[in-house]
Image (cartoon, rainbow, N blue to C red):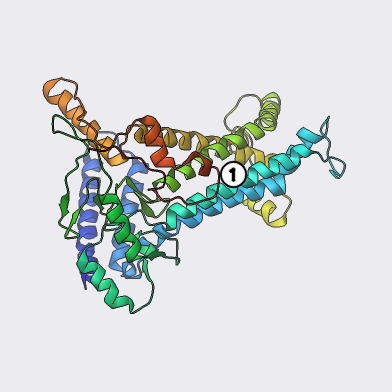
Amino acid sequence: MQHNGENETVNPVYEEHWNETWIRFNRALRSRDDFNAFQWVYVLLKAALGLVYFKTGLHRLGIHNFWRSCVPAFGVGLIASVLLSYFFNLRSVIIHRWCCVPPITGDLSGCRCWWVRFHDIIVLYIGVMIIFHYISATFRSPGVALSQDYIQLIEKKRDGKEMEWKAVNSQGGCCFLDSVLDVNSETKRVLEYKELKVSRSEQGETFPGIKWTFCGKCGIKRPPRCHHCSTCNRCILRFDHHCIWLNNCVGYNNYRSFLLTLFFLTVGCWYGVALLFPPFYELLSEEIKEHGLRFLFDNKTGILSIPPTWKLLCSISSGGLDPEFVIKVIFPLLASIGLLQAVFLAQHVMYVVSALTTLEYKVLLEKQYQSLAERCDVYTAPHNPFNNGWHQNLRLAFGPAAYIFLPLSVDPTLGKTIKKD
């Protein structure tokens, strides 16, 4: 009943949004300021699609929720496509470069060396580690504080059957595969989390706070650093953020899997960049030597003269994709994703070393900006009772060093040494 009520209140919101957008559009037409037609086409189309989507009743099918649950499948597919492109196309480039001097074309049967097997093992290992930790972070519960009323309701509903977090509600899982809701494990995890001791501040002021808070939406008293996520509608232990790529929250129980996904994704991208840089540089030099340094060729596809999309799709379907085309596509993709993931990984390592979550770090930044705006003074952060030193903070986040390079899921309490009062 509550879900239907929410759907019924959506139509007026989107209708009002369309009316406001249309009014602003007419004002912009009559304004003396520059009129950006392309921008207004996008804004009007977006508002119109939202209105049509809810007016026609398509929202009742839950399509706007289902597409978010398919994002992890897209991520795994993208990783798998890169791995397949290596073994079916890029491997021949490696054979030419590392096993045949000078490079040859045609039959590669005489070009075999241990370098090829070395690269095969490394690529396969990195790919397996990325997919393993990605799936683990997607399906693993972040650690949820459940109310007693909710636990009793679940016990009545399941009648001995296993309950699940719903993927369409962004509670973990992918597409039609939901993650398991284990009430006993969630309750045990909260009890273990409650027993973690923290260091006290002599001044009494701490951040993050060590006091319990009350969640009005869930109706529960929750432990410190536990926050309500508006996307998946749960209170998450040591809430960091809700990740659309995981279709899940990142919290106390799956933060390690999230970090290792970033780590191996960064390593894999830059390993591919290092591997493909020599042939990519040769292709780039040949293009510049033949056509000059231009950003658009006759086919309007860019500096490397990449063929149109439909030609690429035809080549893939026929199995005759040119390795040069693969290098032109894969190298920029790996470089851009590798740079982006390296920035994300560096940010989270900084949060880990500081014993802060993404949410807590943003709160500190807002307080610093507010202090500078009001008093023109630098804000001094209070004592962090969860800070155990950078070395121990890294150990708490990544787990024992011996397990980092193994495809294993580690309990967050494994190997912990916490400061005592």
Is any atom of residue 144 visible in this view?
yes
Q: Nearer the viewer, residue 138 or 312?
A: 138
Locate residue 59, reporting x and y percent: 32, 66
> Residue 56, located in which quarter of the rendered image?
bottom left
Residue 170 shown left or right of residue 125 in the figure: left
Locate residue 210, reporting x and y percent: 19, 42
Where disc 1 sits, the SS reads: helix
Q: Nearer the viewer, residue 123 or 393?
A: 393
Residue at the outermost front position: 420
Residue 363 shown left or right of residue 288 in the figure: left
- The residue type indicated by label 1 comes to Ile
Residue 281 shown left or right of residue 386 in the figure: right
Q: Residue at x 33, y 53 (%)?
A: 46
Locate residue 335, reporting x and y percent: 55, 35
Q: Nearer the viewer, residue 385 or 260?
A: 385
Q: Nearer the viewer, residue 415 or 109?
A: 415
Please say if 66 is above or below 319: below
List the residue tagged with mark 1: 126
Q: Residue at x 24, y 51 (%)?
A: 22
Residue 54 shown left or right of residue 82 in the figure: left
